Image (spheres, rainbow, N blue to C red):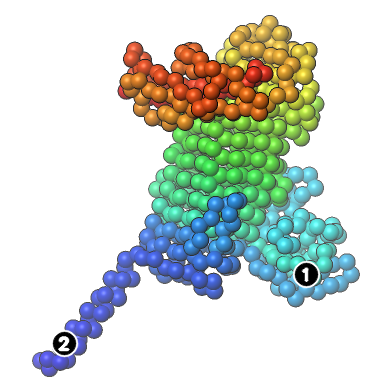
């Protein structure tokens, strides 16, 4: 038998060992300072760890792979773009030891080479280098990637992958020169991950992928699901900023200046991804790599999603569409967004189903397409061979440069048809004589197209009533002719186009809430001139009118209302007669 003091010592040592093992098995908080290896720390800590990242620059050498319930947060809160995120996760390296020979500067020893997922046919003309995930940055500005040394001029660069050498023209003296290396920032199969208060930048993301989200093919309802991505700046990544998956909450991020898309992704293998909220983000200036917008580029592009909500985002100045639903999407809501100055469509629903577009401000989208050179495309709202797209309470402005208003089209797309689309109670302002608003059918098999789709109760303002802006029934007419062929029986048009529409909002009750008894419907209305009146509607039946004070309120008794959903709308008119509306849906038990 061991002596008493020896047994006591062994017991103490054993107890300490158990405590050490227990502390390793339970998650806690890990504070990360500049110089620490984030990837190694994540790999060595248990699931559910919170990683608090101090201000500084962290150049990682491989993607961070979050485990279930991990949290990554910048130590300093940020609200980009108003306040910058000071904890910066970078996928690039800073270059030095440049050589100068002839017209070029060069740096050798560059062994990085990411996946090429597309061909040059998917790049804009003149930008074949969009296929390569690597970028070269001068002071945080991406240069154009060319595909031969002879093409290198100021503002461009060439990567000789075989020779492992980067070439460029501009003098690097006094500039920070970086090249992206790592293919993603956060990428794993982990569930319930939170990423917030970080700047995530300069990753060599292949097209179809993103800096943040699941790896392609790993998205499902049970892997890489239910992430919260909040208050981050996500920028200068070659392909996408964020890739969605089941249950994602993408909140209040600044997703800008990425090479292809701001936010993308969707269902895989025929499985749709529901329960996604994209809210409060600014998504802007994406597609610097010049991927063809008709292929995949712009602000937000999603496929095979259902029940997704995009609310209160500011989506602007993207090369491509602002929001694009492509293929078998259903029951989605685009609500109260500001979508402006995107080169293609504002909201584009393609071969999909049951989309509601309401309360949005859509200005000057598709402006690069003058003189209808893109037919009915380039519209602020476009249903393309889709069913049951309902758009109401939107304000649309068509630029003098180009673009269209609200369009519905049918084309030959096997397995898909156009029907049940209804655009009503919207306001469309034409700044000049450019642009169409209506419907057109290129599919001769869809003989009922014009009876299956409707425009009504919309208000149009344009420079001249003689303007042929309204295609319908295979004709392009001025507004009276549109009514003459059966569309817009209750719509109006005038030449009062120089005054902006008012801004109205319902502040109570909140959307999707239950309503019973007597409900107070409250809101605000404002205008650059003054508000003349506010009307209150229930299911588009006028119930009351207010004299134009703001804030306004109406009382609505649910007595006699059928159980189920009802649309409550406030319609504000300024003293120039231009209106806009705002609507919420409530449920009467």
Mark 2 lies on a secondary structure that is helix
State the quadrant of the N terminus.
bottom left
Q: From the image, tell me which residue sits under label 2.
A: 8
Mark 1 lies on a secondary structure that is loop
Q: Is residue 106 left or right of residue 56?
A: right
Q: Nearer the viewer, residue 43 or 220?
A: 43
Q: Nearer the viewer, residue 575 or 265?
A: 575
Q: Tell me which residue sits at (80%, 64%) in the image.
A: 168
Q: Is residue 47 left or right of residue 107?
A: left
For residue 299, what is the image quadrant? top right
Expressed as whole percent of the image width and height from the top left, the position of residue 234 reads: 59, 53
Q: Tell me which residue sits at (48%, 63%) in the image.
A: 75
Mark 1 nearby-residue class (10 Å; few <14, some 14–19, many ≥20): few
Mark 2 nearby-residue class (10 Å; few <14, some 14–19, many ≥20): few
Q: Is residue 49 left or right of residue 467?
A: left
- Looking at the image, is mark 2 or mark 1 nearer the viewer? 1
- Judged from this view, the residue extending furthest toward the right is 102
Q: Nearer the viewer, residue 282 or 522?
A: 522
User: Would you place residue 258 above or below residue 310 in this image?
Assistant: below
For residue 347, what is the image quadrant? top right
Q: From the image, tell me which residue sits under label 1.
A: 174
Asked whether the residues under the numbered discs 2 and 1 touch, taking CB atoms below 8 Å apart as contact, a structural biologist would say: no
- Judged from this view, the residue extending furthest toward the bottom is 3
Q: Nearer the viewer, residue 221 or 360?
A: 360
Q: Tell me which residue sits at (42%, 28%) in the image.
A: 509
Expressed as whole percent of the image width and height from the top left, the position of residue 84 reads: 59, 57
Number of numbered discs overlaid on the protein picture: 2
Expressed as whole percent of the image width and height from the top left, the position of residue 151 reads: 84, 57
State the quadrant of the C terminus.
top left
Say which mark, if any, is on residue 284.
none
Observer able to see residue 560: yes
Q: Tell me which residue sits at (82%, 67%) in the image.
A: 171
């Amino acid at each position: 038998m061991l002596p008493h003091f020896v047994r006591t010592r062994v017991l103490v040592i054993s107890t300490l060992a158990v405590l050490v093992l227990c502390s390793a098995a339970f998650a806690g908080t890990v504070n990360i300072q500049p110089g620490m290896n984030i990837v190694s720390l994540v790999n060595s800590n248990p699931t559910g760890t919170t990683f608090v990242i101090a201000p500084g620059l962290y150049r990682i050498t491989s993607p961070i792979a979050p485990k279930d319930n991990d949290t990554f947060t910048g130590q300093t809160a940020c609200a980009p773009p108003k306040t910058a995120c000071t904890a910066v996760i970078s996928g690039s390296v800073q270059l030095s030891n440049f050589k100068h020979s002839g017209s070029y500067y060069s740096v050798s020893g560059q062994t990085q080479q990411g996946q090429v997922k597309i061909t040059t046919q998917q790049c804009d003309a003149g930008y074949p280098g969009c296929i390569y995930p690597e970028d070269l940055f001068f002071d945080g500005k991406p240069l154009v990637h060319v595909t031969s040394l002879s093409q290198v001029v100021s503002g461009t660069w060439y990567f000789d992958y075989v020779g492992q050498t980067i070439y460029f023209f501009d003098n690097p003296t006094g500039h920070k020169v970086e090249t992206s290396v790592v293919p993603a920032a956060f990428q794993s199969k982990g569930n319930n991950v939170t990423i917030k208060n970080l700047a995530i930048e300069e990753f060599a993301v292949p097209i179809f992928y993103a800096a943040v989200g699941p790896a392609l093919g790993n998205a499902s309802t049970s892997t890489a699901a239910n992430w919260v991505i909040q208050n981050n700046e996500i920028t200068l990544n070659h392909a996408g900023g964020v890739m969605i998956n089941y249950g994602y909450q993408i909140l209040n991020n600044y997703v800008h200046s990425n090479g292809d898309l701001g936010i993308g992704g969707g269902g895989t293998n025929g499985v749709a991804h529901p329960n996604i909220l994209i809210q409060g983000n600014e998504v802007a200036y994406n597609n610097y790599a010049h991927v063809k917008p008709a292929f995949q580029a712009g602000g937000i592009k999603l496929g095979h999603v259902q029940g997704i909500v995009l609310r209160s985002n500011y989506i602007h100045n993207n090369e491509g569409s602002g929001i694009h639903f492509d293929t078998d999407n259903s029951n989605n809501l685009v609500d109260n967004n500001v979508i402006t100055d995107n080169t293609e469509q504002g909201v584009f629903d393609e071969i999909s189903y049951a989309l509601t577009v309401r309360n949005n401000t859509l200005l000057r989208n598709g402006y690069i397409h003058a003189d209808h050179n893109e037919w009915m495309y380039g519209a602020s709202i476009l249903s393309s061979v889709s069913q049951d797209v309902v758009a109401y309470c939107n304000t649309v402005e068509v630029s003098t440069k180009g673009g269209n208003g609200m369009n519905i089209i049918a084309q030959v797309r096997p397995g898909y048809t156009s029907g049940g689309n209804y655009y009503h109670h919207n306001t469309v302002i034409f700044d000049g004589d450019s642009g169409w608003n209506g419907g057109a059918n290129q599919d001769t098999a869809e003989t009922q197209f014009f009876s299956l789709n409707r425009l009504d109760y919309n208000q149009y303002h344009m420079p001249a009533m003689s303007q042929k802006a309204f295609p319908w029934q295979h004709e392009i007419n001025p507004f009276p002719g549109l009514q003459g062929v059966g569309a817009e029986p209750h719509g109006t048009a005038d030449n009062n186009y120089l005054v902006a529409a008012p801004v109205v909002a319902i502040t109570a009750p909140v959307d999707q809430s239950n309503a019973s008894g007597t409900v107070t419907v409250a809101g605000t209305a404002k205008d650059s001139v003054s508000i003349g009146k506010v009307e209150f509607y229930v299911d588009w039946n006028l119930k009351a009118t207010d004299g134009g004070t703001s804030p306004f309120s109406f009382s609505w008794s649910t007595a006699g209302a059928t159980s189920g959903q009802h649309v409550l709308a406030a319609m504000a008119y300024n003293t120039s007669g231009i209106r806009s509306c705002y609507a919420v849906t409530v449920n009467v038990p």
